[in-house]
Amino acid sequence: MESTLSSLSTVYSYYLKNYYRSRSFYLIFSLVSVASVLMIYLSIHYLPKIDSLFSTQTSVPSDLKEKVVLYLWSYVMSDLPVFAAVFFSSPAISSEIENRTAFHIFALPVDRSVLLIGKYLAAASAATISMAIFVVSEMATAEYLFPGISFNSILLSVGVLLVFILAISAFTFMVSSLFSKNLYSYITTFIIYFIVFNAANLILSLLYNYNAFFLLDNAASVIPRIFLNVSPSVFGSGFSLNGAPLSTLLLSLSIMVIYIICSLVTALVIFERKEVR
Amino acid sequence: MEVEISSLSKNYGKIQALKNVSLLIEGNGLVTFLGANGAGKTTLFKILTSIVRPSSGSINVNGVNVDSNPRKVLSNIGSLVEEPEFYPYLTGRELLEFTAKIRGESSRDLKEEVERVSRLTDISGYLERKSGEYSRGMKQRLGVAVALVGNPELLVLDEPTFGMDPKGMLEMRKVLRDMKKDKDRLIIMSTHLLEEARALSDRTIILKKGEIKYDSQGTDRKSLVRVTGTIDPSHDFKYGRIIEIGEGYYIFDVFDRNKIPEFNRELLSSGSSIMYISSADELEKEFTKD
């Protein structure tokens, strides 16, 4: 047990080093930085104009403005990990075959499960680190616009975001384990997440008036809904100026945890049988 | 050290890379698998290092089955299989440290071990460079250094001099010669270079199309002589016999290697027209024959 944990720690630390020195990391970091700057600009520039958007005599209450701003930040925040996961996790297993690094690691006296879990945790960590600048920008902007704001809801959304990063990374690891070419892995992840999930959502929602709560993108939509219970991706899901109820939050978290477990178990089964020709 | 290969076969779809190979390798020294590309050498090494699984048959190392207990077997094997590639953003030192840690080296001995293997393979000056910046030959040296980490009893080296310049090849052969002096170590390597097998091996096994075609162990070493010229094949030679007739040459098996001078005299006095006489290499003959 001790030696397994020691091996896991070694695998994790060296994979993380390889991740955060990679071009992919700098690319994602730049993408997140640009998104942060745009959100800061949007928040500061358009917040004073919110009142004029609603053609009423009375001004929009401050707490609603706060919720709208944080909703928008979290809405963007819930999409960014998908790009990070695609860059870090999609090639995670396929690259070992395509780049032939598997010849080195498969011949080491370490269980493949340790290699997989170590790399998975490293990829999820790299995605989390790359998201840090966005979270810090969100908090700083919120404090600037709404002095004395309570960070509880923001921290809750960041907590759910971390679970989502683990879920989307596990899911992309599973996709990656199916392929021996990085490109197939990238494309398949994008197609499943942005086309298959959306199409399934649209069909079930429009034709059967059924909320496909089990899809990972729907589960992730709970991150902005912590502030306003609005889900643009689910038709007829209702609208509430309050945050999503606890039951919705717990259901979404459960879905993410199920994705983590099922994806990792599947990836592990495939990875254990993976051969390098 | 004992490596027992029993009825080993490996299929890649319809391609049969290894066909029912059985072999016992015991003791120490250097055993070479010689074969052309596609002979099955790398597939055999991949199974030995648990990179692929056999379709049938097994390999046991010191009585432990590679397929059912890979971790235990691999803790005793250092390997370099195919052209090595490493994580490009890690330095040579980090890759060696990573391997050493996985092999259970203590943090105290880590630096010393990295220095030892990098000195042996002459990569000390490149340790702080990221492996993605290494040349083909440098990666090969790093691959051998990685295999040496932890001083394993069994070294499995797949074409260790591949991609090296002539100077690098000579240096690597010297490293291999030094390593095989270690009484507690068995080195199994592959090559497609006849002269490399000849220069380094204690035992040579020729693989062709997934089958063992020749094993120098247990084979009576013949004294073969190549005679270029014209000979009457019906002549009854006392000291040897013709075993192969080629275009303008004859291969003789001389019955007693101590009687080669007598055989030469007999040849010259037989009325044959001889241009020159040279020794014929049995390994070359086995390697080149269809």
Image (spheres, rainbow, N blue to C red):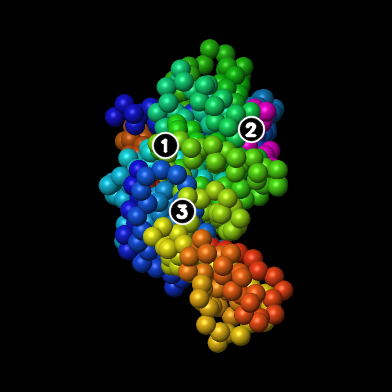
Measure the alpha-carbon separation of dots 2 and 3: 29 Å
Task: Point out the frontmost of discs 1 and 2.
Answer: 1
Q: Quadrant of residue B87?
A: top right
Residues flagged by tags 1 and 2 on a common chain: yes
Q: Are marks 2 and 3 in contact (CB under 8 Å)?
A: no
Number of residues whose C-alpha sits closer than 10 Å to that of mark 2, classed few (under 14), some (14–19) or many (20 or more): some
Q: Quadrant of the C terminus of chain B?
A: bottom right
Q: Position of residue A233 (x, y in %)?
A: 49, 48
The three-letter code of the residue at mark 2 reads Ile
Q: Residue furthest bottom?
A: B234
- Helix, strand or loop at label 1? It is loop
The three-letter code of the residue at mark 1 reads Lys
- Relative to residue A222, is residue B235 drawn left or right? right
B58 above or below A170? below
Task: Point out the frontmost of discs 2 and 3.
Answer: 3
According to the picture, the residue beneath numbered tag 3 turns out to be B203
Counting residues from the start of the chain, the first of labels 3 and 1 encountered is 1
Task: Tell me the subunit letter for badge 2.
Answer: B
> Magenta segment: does it hold B126?
yes
Measure the alpha-carbon separation of dots 3 and 1: 16 Å
- For the residue pair B233 and B8, the one nearer the viewer reads as B233
Q: Quadrant of residue B168?
A: top right
According to the picture, the residue beneath numbered tag 2 turns out to be B123
Residue drawn 63% across the image and 77% down it: B269
Q: Are marks 3 and 1 in contact (CB under 8 Å)?
A: no
Please provide the residue range marked out in magenta.
B125-136
- Helix, strand or loop at label 2? It is loop
According to the picture, the residue beneath numbered tag 1 turns out to be B183
Q: Position of residue B59 (x, y in %)?
A: 33, 54
